[in-house]
Amino acid sequence: MAGGVARGRLTEERKAWRKNHPYGFVAKPETGTDGSANIMVWHCLIPGKSNTDWEGGCYPLTLHFNEDYPTKPPVCKFPANFFHPNVYSSGLVCLSILSQDNGWRPSITVKQILVGVQDLLHQPNPNSPAQSSANHLFVKQPDEYKRRVLLQAKQYQPKM
C-alpha cells in the first residue's frame, strides 16, 4: 500500500502548504481536464531571491512524485533548456537533497525542496555541474553568466 502512503503524505503536505508557505511561492497539484487534482504532480513557481541576479523572475518547476514517496524523492524539473549550472538541459535539477543516494531523507517536505531549489538558483554548486556551458560561464566568465541570468529573469517575470 505504498501508493496510499505517498498520496496521504502529499495530501497532508498540501494542507500544510495552504496554511503556511513562503511568500511568493506557488505549489499546487496538477488539475486534470475534468477538474480533478493529480496529487502526484505539482506545478510550482519559485520567486528569485531578493538582492540576487535572479530577483524579478518567477521560475516554473514541476515536481513528479512516485508511489514510493517519501522513501524516494520527487523528480524536479524546470522547463527544458533552463540556464543554470546545476540544471540539465532536460530541466532536471541536480541538488543533493533530491538525490536518493546522497542527501534525500523522507522527512524533507515540499516546502524544504522549493526553498532549497531557490537557494540553488543563486548559489550554484560548481563541483556538481549538470550543464557544462552554464557552469563554465559561472566559473570563468561571471559577467556573461550574470547577463544570461538577468535575461532569464526577464523571460520569467510574473504575468500580471
Image (cartoon, rainbow, N blue to C red):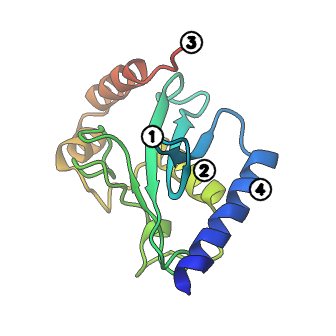
Q: Amino acid at mark 3?
A: Met
Q: Residue furthest right?
A: 19
- Residue shown at 59% from the left, 45% from the top: 28
Spatial CA distance of label 4 from label 3 is: 27 Å
Task: Reply above or below: 60 against 13.
Answer: above
Q: Which mark is residue 101?
A: none
Local packing at callout 1 (Cα closer than 10 Å; few below 14, some 14-19, many 20+) is few
Image position, residue 87 (x, y; %):
32, 50
Quick check: 118 left or right of 141?
A: right
Quick check: 32 left or right of 8?
A: left
Viewer-side label of 1, 2: 1
Q: Which residue is mark 3?
A: 160
Secondary structure of the residue carrying tag 2 is helix
Q: Amino acid at mark 2?
A: Val
Tell me whether the residue at label 3 lies in contact with that at label 2, contact meaning CB atoms closer than 8 angstroms.
no
Of the pair 148 and 91, the residue shown nearer to us: 91
Spatial CA distance of label 3 from label 2 is: 23 Å
Spatial CA distance of label 4 from label 2 is: 15 Å
Q: Which residue is mark 4?
A: 16
Q: Which residue is mark 1?
A: 33
Spatial CA distance of label 1 from label 2 is: 30 Å
The part of the image, by quadrant, that contains residue 83 is top left
Quadrant of the image for the C terminus? top right
Closer to the N terminus: mark 1 or mark 4?
A: 4
Task: Reply above or below: 94 against 29.
Answer: below
Secondary structure of the residue carrying tag 3 is loop
Viewer-side label of 3, 1: 1
Closer to the N terminus: mark 4 or mark 3?
A: 4
Tell me whether the residue at label 1 lies in contact with that at label 4, contact meaning CB atoms closer than 8 angstroms.
no
Q: Which residue is mark 2?
A: 115
